[in-house]
Amino acid sequence: MVSECLLFVIYRPTFRRIIRNQSTEQFSGLPYIYSLLNCLICLWYGMPFISPNIILVATVNSIGAVFQFIYIAIFIAYADKSKKQLKMSVLLVLVFALFAGIAFVSLRFLDSHTRQLFIGYLSVFSLISMFASPLFIINLVVKTRSVEYMPFFLSLATFLMSLSFFAYGMLKGDGFISVPNGIGTILGVVQLALYYHYSSKYDDSSREPLLAYA
C-alpha cells in the first residue's frame, strides 16, 4: 500500500511549483482527469458488494481519488486562462457524471455476477489505458537518448505499484487485477531499464517536468 500512496504523492513537486508561481504554465491537467476516473472505477470494483474480499483495492483507490481531486482543484484554481479553467471544470463534472452512470447501471440493471464482470472489464480497460500512456515517453527516451522526460521516482513508484497489485491479484485469483497490473509491471521494468541505460547521458541542466508541454 505504501508504493501505491507514493505514486499518488509523487506529483507534489509539480503542484508546489504551480502554487509558488501562481500559474499552471504549460502543464496539462488531463493526466489527473484520467487518473481520477481510473481511481473511481477501480474503487467501485473493490467495493464488497461488487467484488468481495478485495477491500484493499477500494481503500487504495479511495485515497488516490482524493489526491487526484485535490490536484485538479489546485489546477483549476491556478489555471492561466478562463478557457482552461472551464475545460478542466467541465471534464471534472463529466468524470463524476460518467462514474455516477456506471454505478447506477451496475446496481440497477445487473445481477451480482454480471455486475462484477461489467465493472471488472471497465477497470481493466481503464488500467491498461493508464499504463499505456508511458509508451509515448519510452519512445521519446529512445529517440532522444535522454531520460529528461522520464523522472526516476515516478517510474519506480509505477513499477512498485503494478508489481504489488499484480501479486495481490494472483494471490486473490482475480484476473481483473493481475492482468493489467502484470502489463504495468512489464512496462515499469522497461522504463527502469531505459533509465539505467540512458541516465549517464542525461544533462541535469535540461531537466523539465514530465507533464510539462503535454
Image (spheres, grey):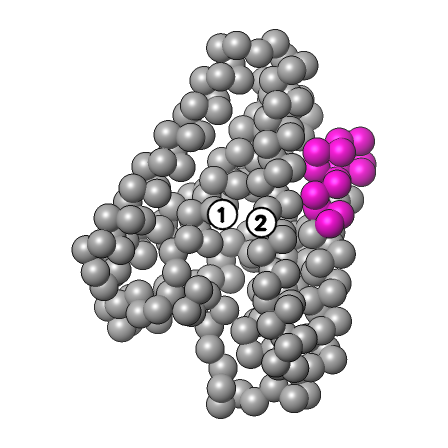
The residue indicated by pointer 2 is: 130
Residue type, mark 2 in image: Met
Up-down: is 175 above or below 69?
Answer: above
Up-down: is 213 above or below 117?
Answer: below
Q: Quadrant of the C terminus?
A: bottom left
Horizontal and vertical percent for residue 71? 37, 53
Task: Please tell me the numbered disc located at residue 164.
Answer: none
- Provide the secondary structure element on which disc 2 rests: helix
Q: From this viewpoint, is residue 26 visible?
A: yes
In the figure, residue 202 lies in which quadrant? bottom right
Query: Is residue 143 rendered magenta in the image?
Result: no
Up-down: is 115 above or below 54?
Answer: above
- Total marks in image: 2
Label the magenta part by its dominant secondary structure.
Answer: helix
- The boundaries of the magenta stretch are 169-183
Report the side of 40 relative to 138 (left or right): left
The residue indicated by pointer 1 is: 35
Q: Residue at x 57, y 35 (%)?
A: 42
Report the side of 184 relative to 78 (left or right): right
Residue type, mark 1 in image: Ser
* Foreground pick, 70 / 95: 95
Sequence-first disc among 1 and 2: 1
Up-down: is 179 above or below 120?
Answer: below
Q: CA distance from mark 1 to mark 2?
A: 7 Å
How crowded pointer 2 is (Cα within 10 Å; few <14, some 14-19, many 20+) is rated as some
Horizontal and vertical percent for residue 73? 31, 50
Marks 1 & 2, CB-CB < 8 Å contact: yes
Horizontal and vertical percent for residue 68? 43, 48
